[in-house]
Amino acid sequence: MKNPDEILDRFLELAPWTRFDEWSGICVEASEPKDGKHDYVCAFFGEDQESDFKLLILRGRDPADRYLQYRSGNWIPEFGLDFATNDGIKVGIVDEEVESYVSCKPGQAPEPLRLDEKQLMFETLDAINTLVTLIDQEKVPTLGETEDYIYYLWKVAGTWRADVREFPDEQFVKYEPIHVQDTRLKRLMAAKLPHEGVWESSSFYLPATRFQGNQEVFVQCAGVAERAGGLLGLVTLEAHADPDQEIVEALIGSIEKQMRIPQFVIVKEERTADRMLPIVQSLDIQIRLRKRLRELERIRDEMIESFPEDEADEQ
């Protein structure tokens, strides 16, 4: 691997963010295969409120799928990054200088990069440098606006190779169903409650932190709201809580309090819908997926506006 300072200087010299009008996906094989599978990162650029540009290096379970969600309008990178809801590295660029780079993990305040994270960042920068050079040499075509393709980089004998490919196949994941006490569900079914209304349910972070042991983390909530009807239930998640489990707990608690069952419940994540499907089916609730939960977003924004200004400035 080249000297990190040389990679950083070359990265700034090529100024790759000027080559892309908006977020552009770059998929990199970030490690040697393990059990026949590669680890990937997905890097892309965009404007930022705090800096001229930012580079987001997504890692984790399925970064390429996350990029597809952005291109299809199902994910807004600014919110996900600002509240550290993604496993990634944020690089801030001001006046054509890399001003900062921090590690962002779900629910945690940004932290300095560990050594292995720095190595990952520089490896990705080196790959991006190679890509820009190959595009200038017309060895790799310019990627258009089609969301089905992405720049793909991998190494052969220590040398980067690049191509335009379809996204890596998403690995099929069988999600563990969420469990609720049978007696609790049987009581609700026996009560013959009326079915009415459309409810939204999701978890979300707030720009406030608390300490979880010695670690500073963002406050996460699970909320239930009725379309144009306001907040029905809100749960603050404890340390290491399962957000999907808490969403279901908030939903069941709201049903018990309201003494009515919604006709529809709307959630954002396919994973959440899959895990809670047996429960909502038992209560004869239809479940739907939507990329925006407008009532919960409105409530969340009102909660954020109510934060003291000095507290918000510290975040």
Image (cartoon, rainbow, N blue to C red):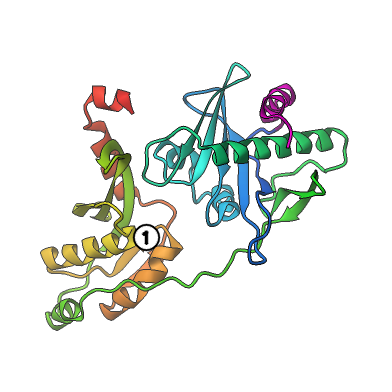
x, y percent for residue 213: 26, 43
Left or right: 59 in relation to 50: right
Residue shown at 34% from the left, 70% from the top: 276
Secondary structure found at label 1? strand
Question: Which residue bears the numbered disc 1?
Answer: 267
46 magenta-colored: no
Q: Quadrant of residue 57?
A: top right
Residue shown at 24% from the left, 68% from the top: 262
Q: Does 174 sit above or below residue 83?
A: below
Q: Quadrant of residue 99?
A: top right
Stretch in magenta: 1-19
One can see residue 44 in this view: no
Say which amino acid is labelled 1: Val
Per the picture, the main secondary structure of the magenta-coloured stretch is: helix
Q: Of 274 and 283, which appears nearest the observer?
A: 274
Q: Does 35 sit above or below residue 297?
A: below
One can see residue 212 in this view: yes
Residue shown at 21% from the left, 53% from the top: 235
Q: Does 92 sit above or below residue 157?
A: above
